[in-house]
Image (tube, helix red, strand yellow):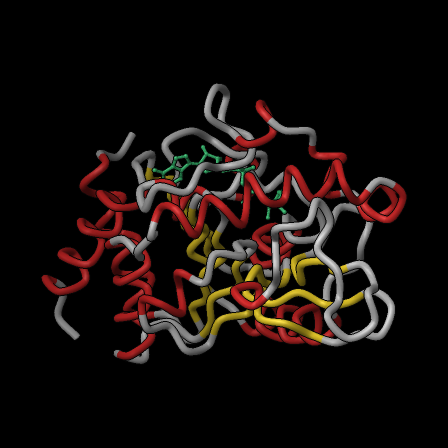
């Protein structure tokens, strides 16, 4: 058994010596910025709200119920909490600046990687920054949408407005899918952070990298769906502590 310090050293060395390191992130990386995860036992969004509300056919047939959940989980929350990137987002942005990280594939829709300064971010599940009319396809910044009605409608045609994040039952945006596939094929190191890895096809990314001989470094206080079979270096810490220690370890190593 190797110690946690040794695992962090090993992970730092893998990152420093990688040919093409990428990060794959989920809700857990933003928890310490104040954004709840989906599947946490007591504070997870899906323990308080019905995930069917963001299933696409449910949304189209019962938009009022869906919009109540969308407003509570994704609109009011981001607006009221003035969320900021944390140390884990910042270390990933810094690794990209130093040429040590090529890309972040994120399942998150909170824009915190970009706010921390990361440039090459693939939003696998879309974004909460914009919303689109389902009838005339006019696109709006979510900050411009009028939320006073039960169901927000298009200012141009009165059609139903849907946020541009991926609902259950929808496909992954094709550009995000293509870019992620290309990055996954190139990656020899995957830093996976704060995801349960149960939602597909996103959960296939670390599996594919491990199966093609790459190293999966996982940061998560509790094991995910892939830890036992596909994670090579498991760091059982919250994202902020893990990345603070990883950054220190990278700086200690000779380049
Ligand atoms: N640091 C890192 N990870 C953490 C922390 C922390 N401080 N706290 C909790 N976690 C971990 C949890 O242990 C869990 O494995 O974050 C993970 C969050 O898992 P989910 O809530 O399932 O989030 P995610 O994997 O991003 O969900 C995938 O599901 O509903 C959809 O579309 C939504 O993109 C989302 C997808």
Residue 24 drawn at (x, y percent): 50, 57
Residue 170 lies in quadrant:
bottom right
- Nearer to the camera, 232 or 49: 49
Left or right: 85 in relation to 162: left
As drawn, 114 above or below 239: below
User: Could you tell me how many numbered marks the image carries?
Assistant: 0
As drawn, 69 above or below 250: above
The residue positioned 55% from the left and 39% from the top of the image is 72
As drawn, 147 above or below 233: below
Left or right: 6 in relation to 150: left
Left or right: 133 in relation to 235: right
Question: Can I make out residue 233 in this image?
Answer: no
The residue positioned 82% from the left and 65% from the top of the image is 158
Residue 39 drawn at (x, y percent): 55, 30
Residue 237 lies in quadrant:
top left
Residue 18 lies in quadrant:
bottom left
């Amino acid at each position: 058994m190797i110690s946690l310090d040794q695992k962090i050293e090993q992970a730092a060395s893998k990152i420093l010596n990688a040919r093409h390191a990428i990060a794959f992130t989920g809700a857990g990386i933003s928890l310490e910025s104040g954004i709840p995860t989906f599947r946490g036992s007591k504070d997870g969004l899906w323990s308080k709200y019905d995930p069917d509300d963001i299933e696409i056919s449910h949304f189209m047939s019962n938009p009022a119920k869906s919009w109540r959940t969308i407003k509570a989980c994704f609109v009011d929350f981001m607006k009221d909490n003035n969320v900021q990137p944390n140390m884990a987002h910042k270390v990933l942005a810094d690794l990209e600046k130093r040429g040590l990280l090529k890309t972040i594939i994120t399942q998150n829709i909170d824009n915190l990687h970009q706010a921390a300064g990361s440039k090459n971010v693939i939003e696998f599940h879309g974004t909460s920054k914009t919303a689109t009319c389902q009838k005339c396809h006019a696109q709006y910044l979510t900050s411009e949408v009028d939320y006073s009605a039960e169901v927000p409608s298009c200012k141009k045609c009165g059609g139903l407005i849907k946020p541009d994040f991926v609902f259950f039952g929808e496909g992954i945006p094709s550009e995000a899918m293509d870019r992620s596939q290309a990055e996954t094929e190139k990656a020899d190191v995957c830093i996976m952070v704060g995801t349960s890895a149960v939602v597909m096809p996103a959960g296939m990314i670390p599996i594919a990298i491990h199966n093609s001989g790459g190293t999966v470094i996982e940061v998560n206080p509790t094991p995910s769906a892939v830890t036992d079979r596909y994670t090579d270096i498991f760091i059982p810490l919250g994202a902020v502590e893990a990345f603070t220690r990883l950054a220190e370890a990278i700086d200690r190593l000779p380049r």
